[in-house]
Image (tube, helix red, strand yellow):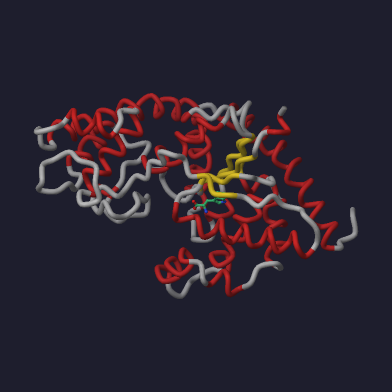
Amino acid sequence: MEENKKIIFSGIQPSGNLTLGNYLGALKNWVKLQDEYECYYCVVDLHAITVRQEPKDLRRRTLEVLAIYLAAGLDPEKNTIFIQSHVPAHAEGAWLLNCFTYTGELSRMTQFKDKSQRYGESISAGLLDYPVLMAADILLYNANLVPVGKDQKQHLELTRDIAERFNSLYSPTFNIPEPYIPELGAKVMDLQEPTKKMSKSADNPNSYILIMDPPDVIRKKISRAVTDSLGIVKYNDEQPGVKNLITILNAITGMSIDQIEKKYEGQGYAQFKLDVADAIVNELEPIQKRINEILNDKEYLESIYRKGAEKANYVANKMLRKMQKKIGFIPR
Ligand code: TRP
């Protein structure tokens, strides 16, 4: 039975505090996949060091992301939950795949172009190579589906190209992974500039809600969220701020867009915003409590990531050996 399940791989970088966007856009959906698919969810710490990280922050955030995975409802019995650097095959696989990737392809990635502009002189080779490590993540588990946001679609395209190249140079080795975009993919936007994706790296903290934000902060941020002067709760592209708040309410409560529009007809934004804030607080409060409990139980956390790494190492090493053999390395 297990064998017939499609394989899913995804990961989040421990490079900043996770936002409501990570929760509604990724985690909440991952939880729905855990019965139907064989899922690998990774904390991608090797990716995080493509830009400078304070060691103690990296340590704290890595465990925090793990705790968030668990608190959001990912069952460690059903999913393989692990830390990327605990599975050396990712780094080794990335090296192999590097030799099947062109520098031209990497320098054309829009995320690389954006980031290299932002970091000026000090662009690490890791930043350029980032998508190849991501390809290794995905291909080592022979993933069929990869839940990612729009900003990662280009990286996934490259993963497919690398996989196809390897398959045709040698023999069929990798599944060609597809992006998995959930039907009602909640793309949560920046609260101050609602035409941009909500990001933990925005300069203005009013732009995002963190999973760990306390209730009063959440309420304040929602009350300050940019809307417009139309005063109509309607889901459309001319009102990106309102659209975003409707998206959030819909993703949390399951109320349809129609229902939401009807409920607030003729009422302006005041009550609507209060209700959006309430919905977020009600959703996040129990999760925050659970996150703190988990973080306080280091032994439990350790047992989860040890077990996850054991399973992931087994699967990833099998694929790595296969790659090495095809390339022509002497078996150990
Ligand atoms: N690059 C992804 C991001 O920043 C994180 C990531 C790393 C990832 N490896 C992955 C996502 C493999 C999906 C699959 O969002």
Picture layout, residue 69 above or below residue 286:
below
Picture layout, residue 130 above or below residue 282:
below
Image position, residue 269 (x, y; %): 13, 37
**Residue at left 49%, top 40%?**
65
Q: Is residue 263 left or right of residue 190?
A: left
Image position, residue 20 (x, y; %): 36, 40
Q: Is residue 323 left or right of residue 98?
A: right
Image position, residue 313 (x, y; %): 73, 42
Q: Quadrant of residue 167?
A: bottom right
Q: Quadrant of residue 9?
A: top right
Q: Quadrant of residue 308?
A: top right
Quadrant in which the N terminus appears:
top right
Image position, residue 180 (x, y; %): 52, 45
Q: Is residue 152 left or right of residue 211?
A: right
Asked whether 319 or 307 is in front, the reply is 319
**Residue at left 46%, top 63%?**
111
**Residue at left 30%, top 31%?**
256
Asked whether 126 or 178 is in front, the reply is 178
Asked whether 271 or 199 is in front, the reply is 271
Q: How many marks?
A: 0
